[in-house]
Image (cartoon, rainbow, N blue to C red):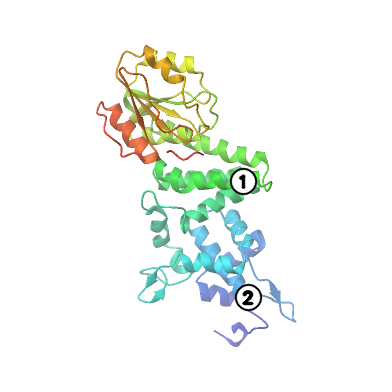
Amino acid sequence: MNQDAAPTAELGWPVGAVAERLGIAAPTLRSWDRRHGVGPSVRTSGNHRRYTEIDIRRVELMSRLTAQGIPAQSAADSVLAMDASSIAQRLDGDRPDVGGQRGRPGGPVGPAGLAGPAGTDDLAGLAEGSGPTGDVSDLVEAIVSAARTLDPRTMAQVYHQVLRRREVGRAWVEVFVPALRRVGDLWEEGQLGVQSEHLTSELLQSELRAVMRANRLRVAGAPVILASADDEQHHLPLLALEAELARRGVASLFLGPRVPADALVSALRESRPRALFLWASLSRPADEPFWRRLEVVDWDLEVVIGGPGWHDGVAVPEGPVALMRVSDFGSAVRLLATRSRGRLADAGAPQLSEN
């Protein structure tokens, strides 16, 4: 490094020194500065722009986010919204201890190491049921950022990327539910308009339906019926469930939100399914009137209920209708997939998330 590139407390780092230090091409750094505002923040007495240490940390985090496939503008929005402490926590918290050193196994610390296959593998390798930490929370923030700016292109890209790298169930639990909850919280706090919430939901519906279309020729067998309780408007969990079942080759029939009880019973009588999944996020009556309508069922029917709206101790009338309750997405998928093949097994119950 030459004398001109040597940083001082007053002058900071020139772009060439940052490129050398982080292993990022100088044209890339200039592009991020020009297009997205992630760049040097101080000037010398000669009017030359220089990177401070926090500027470099922003660039480092920007590099990691874009390496995961998050669009540059969404990555920039995220890092620019963070303070120095949040950036340090994000960078340092995502690097496991290796031989007493902070860093990725098998690679250097910094963007050059994070941008390669190791970072991509980490993104796709989270265990089932794990929470939105590290790479996953970056994806959640990218969705929220796109909701803030009403950016459908970026949001659709993130949705598509998540579904390409994960099973639908893991995508739903790890990324989509936390993002939907975050957008909903911001709307309730008045920080987002209802248009942002609608965009987030509508685009996710489109991507989930694309999964179903892509797997339509793979499904086989008698379909299980997926329905919401009457007056229930939150149906995204059912779309996610339908998409995951389709990915597994399980036929299902989703009747949409707010299906009147009479219409649901008619659909049951016409199709005579082995299983019905009934979703409720809104509180249902303790004496659920729908169960009395099932007295017309004269074949073996398993009713699987999910969602936080159901009371404890729910019971159906005596007869060929059996009732099971599940309390997580994976249990619902396993039970319905098993039932579609004519072999009912206890799914190990724990509710689909309420979003």
**Amino acid identity at mark 1:** Ala
- Seen in the picture, residue 234 relative to 180 is either above or below; the reply is above
Q: Nearer the viewer, residue 346 or 343?
A: 346
Residue depicted at x 64% and y 67%? 39
Question: Number of labelled discs?
Answer: 2
Q: Which secondary structure lies at badge 1?
A: helix
Q: Nearer the viewer, residue 102 or 274?
A: 274
Residue depicted at x 38% and y 54%? 126
Q: Nearer the viewer, residue 334 or 205?
A: 334
Answer left or right for 63 relative to 316: right
Q: Give the quarter of the image for residue 198.
A: top right
**Amino acid identity at mark 2:** Thr
Q: Residue 68: where, in percent of width, then height?
A: 47, 56
Q: Residue 152: where, in percent of width, then height?
A: 60, 42
Using the image, tell me which numbered label, if any, was put on residue 52.
Answer: 2
- Seen in the picture, residue 256 relative to 95 is either above or below; the reply is above
Q: Residue 16: where, in percent of width, then height?
A: 58, 75
Using the image, tell me which numbered label, if any, was put on residue 147.
Answer: 1
Using the image, tell me which numbered label, if any, was put on residue 165.
Answer: none
- Seen in the picture, residue 321 relative to 32 is either above or below; the reply is above
Q: Which secondary structure lies at badge 2?
A: loop
Looking at the rendered image, the quarter that the N terminus falls into is bottom right
Classify mark 2: residues with Cα within 10 Å, few (<14), some (14-19) or many (20+): many
Answer left or right for 11 relative to 229: right
Q: Nearer the viewer, residue 199 or 181?
A: 181
Disc 2/disc 1 C-alpha distance (Å) = 30 Å
Q: Residue 284: where, in percent of width, then height?
A: 50, 28
